[in-house]
Image (cartoon, rainbow, N blue to C red):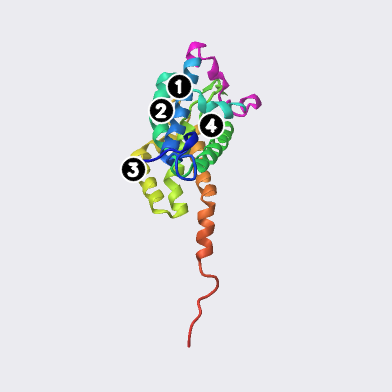
Amino acid sequence: MGMTGTGGQSGPQGQPEKRPAWVVGGLTIVSFVVLLWLIELIDSLTGHRLDSNGIRPLETDGLTGILFAPLLHSNWEHLIANTGPALVLGFLMTLAGLSRFIFATAIIWVLGGLGTWLIGDIGAPTYQGVVVETNHIGASGLIFGWLTFLIVFGFFTRKVWEIVVGVVVLFIYGSILLGVLPGTLGVSWQGHLSGALAGVLAAYLLSGPERKARALRRPVGPPSLST
């Protein structure tokens, strides 16, 4: 049985009890998904006016959509489809460390959005030879980034448990990577592709400490031969 010190602090030195990493990670990703649902509720009550704040490719005023697009969804079905993968993949991301989760998410969010802004009109429908204006919204680009991050991160760090996580994630969710290819009308394969590439880049950048440590352990120069 544990003992609680004065002031609600535990332990003999009065240190506050630290929550397990998985609890902090779970609360973080659940809070993010709850935010998505609250935004969609507001969007629905206002006649989906928020949806116009997505990424409009190659338009200067469409750049602000990079910040807002992952928070917006076209309808409840769109949000529900993203909720499950966001909870699972987002939670697994937090297990690599909360700071890494934040930095990886920021990289995927910004670079994935910028990539969508650059290529978002490729393959878009046309009317009389003119590309119909597209507006990219949804958290799926972020989800694709989390997915590819988890798949490749372990191969950069060479940590067994992270490799195992990557293999399991690839086995369970690998089929959705086909979403980076043009196909279904109205689905932003450009956003999926940009997010996926940003996830690989984030994994490489954030595995830097492990890669540097591994490089330092390598022998320098040719081995010595005794005669």
Sequence order check: which comes first, mark 2 or mark 4? 2
Rendering coords of residue 221 (x, y %): 55, 73
Label 4 sits on residue: 122
Q: How far is disc 1 from disc 4 in space, using C-alphas? A: 30 Å
Q: Between residue 195 and residue 23, name the one nearer to us.
A: 23
Q: Nearer the viewer, residue 133 or 52?
A: 52
Q: Earlier in the sequence, mark 1 or mark 4?
A: 1
* Residue mark closest to the camera, 3 vs 2: 2
Q: Residue 83 bears which disc, if any? A: 2
| Residue under the point 43% across and 23% down | 79
- Quick one: SS at disc 2? helix
Is tag 1's residue or tag 3's residue first in the polypeptide sequence? 1
Q: Which residue is mark 1?
A: 37
Q: Are marks 2 and 1 in contact (CB under 8 Å)?
A: yes
Q: Secondary structure at mark 1?
A: helix
Q: Looking at this rendering, what residue extends furthest in the right direction?
A: 60
Measured from the top left, where is residue 103 in percent x and y? 55, 40
Residue 112's image quarter?
top right
Q: Which residue is mark 3?
A: 171
Q: Amino acid at mark 2?
A: Thr
Residue 54 is covered by the magenta coloring: yes
Q: CA distance from mark 1 to mark 3?
A: 28 Å
89 magenta-colored: no
Q: Which residues are magenta?
A: 43-63
